[in-house]
Image: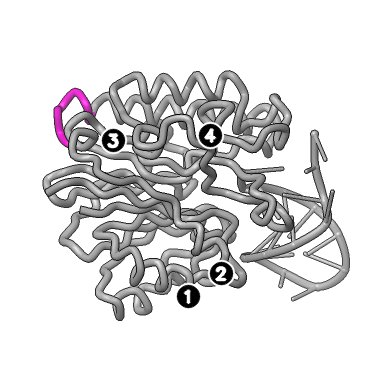
Amino acid sequence: MRLATLNVNSVRKRVPHVCRFLQSAQPDLLFLQELKCKTEEFPAKEFAALGYQSHAVGQHGGRNGVAVLARIPFKVVAEGLPGEEEDTHARYIEVEAADARFAGIYLPNGNSGGAEGYAYKLRWMERLRTIAAERLDSFQPFAILGDFNVCPTALDLAPGSMPPTDALVRPETRAAFRALTHLGLTDAVRALHPGERLYTYWDYGPAFDTNRGLRIDHALLSPELAERLETADIDLGLRAMEQPSDHTAVTITLRQ
DNA sequence: ATGGCTACAGCATGTAGA
């Protein structure tokens, strides 16, 4: 089974990129983030033509938005992250497929909106930890894929590319990420590539050519799925295309 | 340390991204 995640930075601008990725990587499930469109504007037909059914959670105002594309049967079980009723951001989708639960997330960046913007990010991470704990307590195979907006360690960003006060690397951010993984979730890319400098995001401009990037897109696996982990790879070709997203895709394969 | 990019809303720039 193949699972993938990609922050598209506007899905309508990235239809060719997503289609190329679907055809080359052939994921069973692909989670998208930063749709930047309303639900009804999601280009479902283009993906259906390639054999992928989809479900989008869009948002008014051209911000956020998450979706799942699947070539296997799936059922959407959540379109938002529980814990804050007044939270209208489209940042969470959860599906049931292949006898497992998969969450696709777009975790808040946390650099805008001042202190409240960062506080929202930390609250969101705590809400995610709560949900992850519930899923793990029920012993259902579970994974979280998406744009976490967290560089977990110093190995996960180009040296000197960020001030230590940035919301992606702040100690409180990293502690919240560890609180999540310490529940018993495995960082798939890091598990198979220990010690390697790998990035999933490069700023627009010269950053990709000079490989000054960040590793902020992750796949976290419950023990049942981590035992089946076979490969975890980052698609550099997708980021090298014309008019790309500033992120690229992470793909993992599970045995069976 | 960030906006030198990019995208969006909506029509001039402001906000956000990371």
Q: CA–CA distance between discs 1 and 3?
A: 29 Å
Pointer 3 residue = A221
Q: Residues at marks 2 and 1, common chain? A: yes
Q: Quadrant of residue A132?
A: top left
Magenta span contains residue A118: no
Query: Tag 4: residue type?
Result: Val
Chain for disc number 1: A
Nearer-N-terminus badge (2/3): 3
Q: Residue at x 19, y 48 (%)?
A: A96
Q: Which mark is residue A16?
A: 1
Pointer 2 residue = A241
Lateral position of residue A251 relative to residue A60, left or right: left
Residue A98 visible to an observer of this rendering: yes
Query: Tag 3: residue type?
Result: Leu
Pointer 4 residue = A150
Disc 2, disc 1: CB below 8 Å? yes
Q: Quadrant of residue A229?
A: top left
* Discs 2/4, front: 2
Q: Is residue A178 above or below residue A222?
A: above
Nearer-N-terminus badge (1/3): 1
How crowded pointer 1 is (Cα within 10 Å; few <14, some 14-19, many 20+) is rated as: some
Q: Residue at x 64, y 54 (%)?
A: A208
Lateral position of residue A222 relative to residue A32, left or right: left
Lateral position of residue A252 relative to residue A215, left or right: left
